Image (tube, helix red, strand yellow):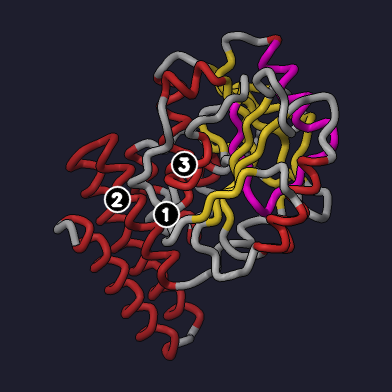
Amino acid sequence: MSTTSPPDVSLVIPAYNRADLLERCLASIRASAGVTWETTVVDNASPEDLSELRQAYPEVRWLRSDSNLGYAAANNLGLRGARGRHHCWLNSDAELFPDTLRRLVDYLDQHPAVGAVTPRNVGPDGETQPCLSPEHTLTMAWLRDSGLHLTFPNARPFRDWMLPGLDWDREQDAETTQTTCLLIRREAYEQVGEMDASLFLFYNDVDWCRRLRRAGWKLVYLPEPRVLHHGSASVETALWKERQLWRDRYRYFGKWYGAAGRLGVRAACLDRGMWRVLAQVVKGRPRQIPPLIELSRRLYATLDEEHNGV
């Protein structure tokens, strides 16, 4: 939507595959009521042809990358030159309700100490999808990522990580949120800066939320409005994804905790592999053990590559 004055919201949507969901996302923006907006889609070298969508949504600014820049870099690119009073990271597998943007904008306009606000995430079944987590501390680099939470899910450190007592019907301050839909005050974005593009796919949201709060801004979760989230539909489950997860994890904890953080991630990677193997032993599935050992070897090799700058 083009306006002579700055729009209320500048939205950026990184796109990679699932053009069908991107179309639904764009249609939901077009149906948004009570706000002015501008939208940029960053085509992250998607194998799918998006030409029909480009024709169907001429009001959208389309940027095409010749290679997959990653989630963080695509968001950064899309917001450069943005004119909106607020910025919005929106996933291509998400759909806004007609009042979502208006409610988010109204909240930021009425609460000057809040730097960013996230709505309730709901799945296609209408159920709430947890989108908040505690700060990712050095302890979590081992406790959660080691895989022990899969064996001892009721132990307090792992149970607390999942925020079991959180009241999703209550407005509340948050430490970390997913960026399915995150509305950011322009002044906060300018102070905190762009996403860390070295975090290619994972932990870029965790890192940015941490920097936001370190800069003195509040991050708030609202039970209303809502955003419909189909859930990681554009990211295929594959070995490269798990390797990238550990690579980004290694970079994140190294960034915030130095050598201790990197060591913690290495220990977690080894422990996770061990617990996976032990689980198959207990279940009497010996044929599953060799591929799990090979997987663990390849994941740990990823950390070696990262450490050596490969």
| Crowding near the residue tagged with mark 3, few <14, some 14–19, many ≥20 C-alpha atoms within 10 Å | some
The amino acid at mark 2 is Tyr
Q: Give the residue displayed 78% in from the left and 31% down from the top.
A: 225
Q: Choose the circle earlier in sequence order: 3 or 2.
A: 3
Distance from label 3 to label 2 (Cα)? 24 Å
- Mark 1, residue position: 69
Q: In the image, is residue 309 part of the stretch drawn in magenta?
A: no
Residue 53 location, quadrant: bottom right
Residue 266 location, quadrant: bottom left
Q: Position of residue 161 (x, y in %)?
A: 52, 41
Of residues 154 and 97, which is closer to you in this image? 97
Res 77 label: 3
Query: Which mark lies nearer to you, 3 or 2?
Result: 3
The amino acid at mark 3 is Leu
The amino acid at mark 1 is Leu
Q: In the image, is residue 93 part of the stretch drawn in magenta?
A: yes
Distance from label 1 to label 3 (Cα)? 9 Å
- Mark 2, residue position: 250
Of residues 105 and 63, which is closer to you in this image? 63
